[in-house]
Image (spheres, grey):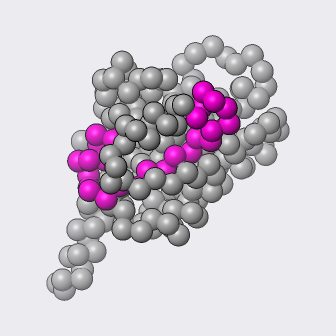
Amino acid sequence: MTAGFWTFWSIVLAKKHIFILGGARSGKSRFAQESAGKLGNKVLFIATGEPLDEEMQTRIDQHKKARPKNWRTLEIPTNIGKQLEEKIGDAEVVIIDCLTLLISNLLGDELDYSKAEKRVMAEINKLMACMDKLDASFIIVSNEVGMGLVPETKLGRVYRDMVGKANQRISQRANETYFMVAGIPMKVKGD
């Protein structure tokens, strides 16, 4: 066999996709960062949150301070797949934090279930195509939003359902899935 053949397969086999799910303040971001350090040195952090108010700006600033200085950060609220293909550079590991904010950004105030589903699933499909195409490991963080009460508003119910569907799709694609409880990762999928 040629050296090129083995190089291709070593890259394919080295790629790992990790999905980290949990509640608010469960340690998802910390665990994602620790996992990234084990997968490679060149890390690209994709932040989906937007500083729409003072509290969110404070949270974003705290997250920035917690990340290693040598990591690149891109703030991408939507259309992650397309932008990643253009801006990945030499990244070995891509962290997307977080899927729930991405979906919130996509939905806005969309109340039509079928339109919301079409919009969210198109974004998730583009992201998964990007994951397949690029030679990087991916760590995707999301909230588990389906374990509480049924949301009171229609928009809340549409949002919960879209996050649940997206979480299922990403978890199916991931090599490993973890559920975070009080800072402790529980592996629910993978070797």
Instruction: Say whether residue 4 is visible.
Output: yes
Residue found 45% across the figure and 59% down from its top: 131
Q: Quadrant of residue 21?
A: top left
Indicate the quadrant containing the N terminus: top left, top right, bottom left or bottom right: bottom left
| Left or right of 131 on screen, residue 125 | right
**Is residue 36 on the magenta stretch?**
yes
Q: Quadrant of residue 108?
A: top right
- Disc count in the image? 0
Instruction: Say whether residue 175 is visible.
Output: no
- Asked whether 127 or 33 is in front, the reply is 33
Residue found 31% across the figure and 59% down from its top: 42
Image coords of residue 65 (percent x, y) = 40, 38
Residue positioned most to the right: 112
The magenta-colored residue range is: 32-57
**Is residue 30 on the magenta stretch?**
no
| Left or right of 40 on screen, residue 125 | right
Image coords of residue 179 (percent x, y) = 38, 28
Image coords of residue 28 (percent x, y) = 40, 32
Q: Quadrant of residue 127?
A: bottom right
- Asked whether 143 or 167 is in front, the reply is 143
Residue positioned most to the bottom: 2
Residue positioned most to the top: 149
Residue found 73% across the figure and 41% down from its top: 107
Q: Is residue 14 above or below residue 97?
A: below
Q: Is residue 75 above or below residue 191?
A: below
Residue found 26% across the figure and 60% down from its top: 14
| Left or right of 76 on screen, residue 30 | left
- Asked whether 45 or 99 is in front, the reply is 45
Image coords of residue 104 (percent x, y) = 66, 38
Indicate the quadrant containing the C terminus: top left, top right, bottom left or bottom right: top left
Q: Is residue 46 above or below residue 63?
A: below
